Image (cartoon, rainbow, N blue to C red):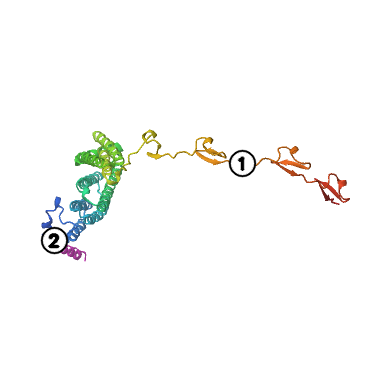
Amino acid sequence: MKLNVINVIFVISILLILISMPVLAQEETTEDNAGVTPDSIFWGIDVALDKLALALTRDNEARAEKGLEIAEERLLEIKAMATEKKIKAMAKAETEHGRVVVKIKEDIEKVEEDDPTEEVKTVIKLEKKIGEHESNLEDVKQKIDIKIRGELTEEQQAMIDSVLSNLEGQTGELKIKVVNKKGETKIKIKVKTGKSDVEIEEEIEGLEDEAGLTRDRTVWAQKAIDHAEEKITNAEEKISEKISEGHNVTIAQDYLTQAKEMLAQAKEKLNAAEYREARKLAQDAGKLAMHAKRGKSFEEIEVEEEAECITHEECKIGEICVEGECEKVEEPECITDADCKENETCVEGECEEVEEEEEAECTVEADCKEGEICTDGECEKVAEPECTVDTDCKEDETCVEGECEKSEE
């Protein structure tokens, strides 16, 4: 039964290859040999053949390598579609790239050799290929950022940003997976040989040199630095252009300053042979430079109207300077009380009527009649008290504050 299934798969694969051969031959001229691209009706066949080839590869290492080849093919398709501004086709290729990355991660995890030293050699080999894939991704991003992005609408740019972000994330997952696998293999070496961590690191560094990984790291770091320098130059040109158009470039210049500082750090790391750190710093410097040239970094400068005046002396006679404008000063109705009528007084340039005060009826109680007191200038009659002592009241009453009140029994 198992043999029959394999035979069926084999026959189907041969048929698919035969059907697609003419198409593949026609599409080989696509940029960077991208082959059949997502905008072709035959692209589905191409993807199906890739999946079939992956399924027929039995060895974990070989399958991981095959997966990386397919991922590279998807990357070339993305680059070709970006050049033609076919953003939706780019997204289709990115989706398939993500699916194959999942398979590669599974195969890396399954890599296992009886000899842990041989296993770490296999992991280093895969790490090298993943680094090459990341470097090619950087080339794609560089072309898009420098040559293509400026020709796209904001909506297209947003879609491309999403595609590139996903690709970066997928490639980053591969890097993490291979580094973790290398760490697991180091533990196996330590258990089997009893070597110290320092001895194991020295041995692995030697294996990396032998595989050409150290040399490649130097190349990748330098390429990242070159890319960052090109992006910084590109951003400087854009900022100069925006200044001439009258834009506020403060935010853009801040980004650019940070990019230059980070690039300087990347070069220091490269000189210190810290290649991975140098590459990462250069990549980040490039991202900052791209932020510097983006539209959101520029603002229209509001041109203020020239002020009519700054001091009162710049205005005509009878005018004063108020918030940059000359305003006519109204003549005051008066300056002193003498400018007003007899019953008026001058208050802040205006004549106001003076309210006549009524003459006080009294100032002291002597001014009033007998039995009256002077209160607030007026004479008021003092009410006679009902009593002064208890004897002035009835038998069952007492005198309380001038009034007779019934006594409590």
Q: Nearer the viewer, residue 322 or 286?
A: 322
Q: Where residue 205 is drawn, which disc sits there?
A: none
Is the stretch drawn in magenta largely helix, strand or loop?
helix
Q: Where residue 356 is drawn, which disc sits there?
A: 1
Question: What segment is highlighted magenta in the picture?
Answer: 1-16
Which amino acid lies under the numbered mark 2 shown in the image of this protein?
Ser
Question: What kind of element bears circle 2?
Answer: helix
Q: Where residue 20 is drawn, which disc sits there?
A: 2
Looking at the image, residue 61 lies above or below residue 286: below
Which amino acid lies under the numbered mark 1 shown in the image of this protein?
Glu
- Label 1: few (<14), some or many (≥20) within 10 Å? few
Q: How many marks?
A: 2
Q: Quadrant of the N terminus?
A: bottom left
Question: What kind of element bears circle 1?
Answer: loop
- Residue 101: where, in percent of width, then height? 25, 53
Q: Nearer the viewer, residue 33 or 344?
A: 344
Tell me the quarter of the picture where residue 206 sits. Answer: top left
**Magenta-span inclusion, residue 8:** yes
Looking at the image, residue 311 lies above or below residue 402: above
Among the two numbered marks 1 and 2 on one chain, the one whose residue lies closer to the N terminus: 2
**Magenta-span inclusion, residue 359:** no
